[in-house]
């Protein structure tokens, strides 16, 4: 793994880059509110070992449970800038994200994000993304009429039954809302919580799963199969 620096206008941001010798797939990893991709190190290593180049931008931690327009647009812009820096011709690009990172990926493939009535987050779509693996995505941002109708990519959506931040009803709603034109592969793991997908959970979080490492290995393998399949 290498740490690279990318310019965003007058500012810069860092990216974790996992390279492989031969690859036809790139994974754009969108981290959750904590901002540090290496908290998902098992998943990132598994993707690299499966032959994928992984590009994982770092972000400042989100303090508020509801991000601002500026925070959301900055994250989406820098995800696209990371692709600009590393994507090569004829490479299949897949988005993998956790929590608000997964939400950002839905916006990048054409979903319209709303913070409230009349308050749309203007995010430029990035149609280089060909499929998405979404871990505990927050989908409440997309419940305006026709907010999802532009999305035309395969989606794997995974959540824990004990997630009280983005509960299973959120991905069940996503699958139902898109059911007329796009199938969403919904996975619900009994006993898992919002942070069960992370090797390193935030401080003071009590893990509900009895065998979290086994779950992380399981879901990481399934995401790899989805990405390269």
Image (spheres, rainbow, N blue to C red):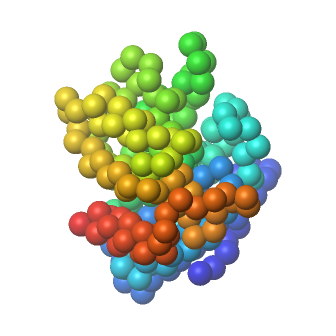
Query: Which residue is farthest bottom?
Result: 21
Q: Quadrant of the C terminus?
A: bottom left
Residue 170 seen: yes
From the viewer's perspective, is residue 170 above or below residue 3? Answer: above
Query: Of 190 and 37, which appears nearest the observer?
Result: 190
Query: Of 138 and 59, which appears nearest the observer?
Result: 138
Query: Of 225 and 91, which appears nearest the observer?
Result: 225
- Residue in the image at 59% along x and 18% along y: 116
- Residue in the image at 56% along x and 74% along y: 41
- Residue in the image at 43% along x and 75% along y: 214
- Quarter occupied by residue 30: bottom right
Q: Position of residue 111 (x, y in %)?
A: 43, 33
Q: Quadrant of the N terminus?
A: bottom right
In this rendering, position of residue 205 left or right of residue 172 = right
Number of callouts: 0
Query: Which residue is farthest right?
Result: 10
């Amino acid at each position: 793994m290498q740490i690279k620096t990318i310019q965003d206008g007058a500012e810069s941001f860092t990216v974790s880059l996992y390279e492989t010798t031969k690859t036809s797939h790139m994974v754009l990893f969108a981290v959750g509110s904590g901002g540090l991709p290496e908290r998902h190190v098992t998943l990132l290593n598994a993707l690299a070992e499966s032959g994928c180049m992984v590009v994982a931008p770092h972000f400042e931690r989100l303090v508020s449970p509801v991000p601002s327009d500026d925070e959301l647009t900055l994250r989406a812009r820098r995800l696209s800038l990371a692709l600009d820096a590393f994507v090569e011709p004829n490479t299949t690009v897949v988005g993998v994200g956790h929590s608000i990172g997964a939400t950002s990926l839905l916006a990048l493939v054409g979903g319209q994000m709303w913070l409230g009535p009349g308050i749309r987050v203007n995010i430029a779509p990035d149609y280089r993304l060909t499929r998405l693996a979404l871990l505990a995505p927050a989908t409440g941002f997309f419940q305006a009429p026709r907010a999802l109708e532009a999305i035309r990519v395969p989606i794997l959506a995974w959540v824990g039954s004990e997630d009280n931040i983005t509960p299973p009803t959120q991905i069940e709603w996503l699958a139902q809302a898109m059911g007329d034109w796009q199938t969403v592969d919904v996975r619900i793991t009994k006993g898992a919580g919002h942070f069960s997908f992370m090797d390193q959970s935030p401080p003071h979080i009590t893990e509900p799963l009895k065998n979290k490492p086994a779950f992380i290995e399981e879901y990481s393998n399934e995401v790899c199969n989805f990405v390269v399949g």
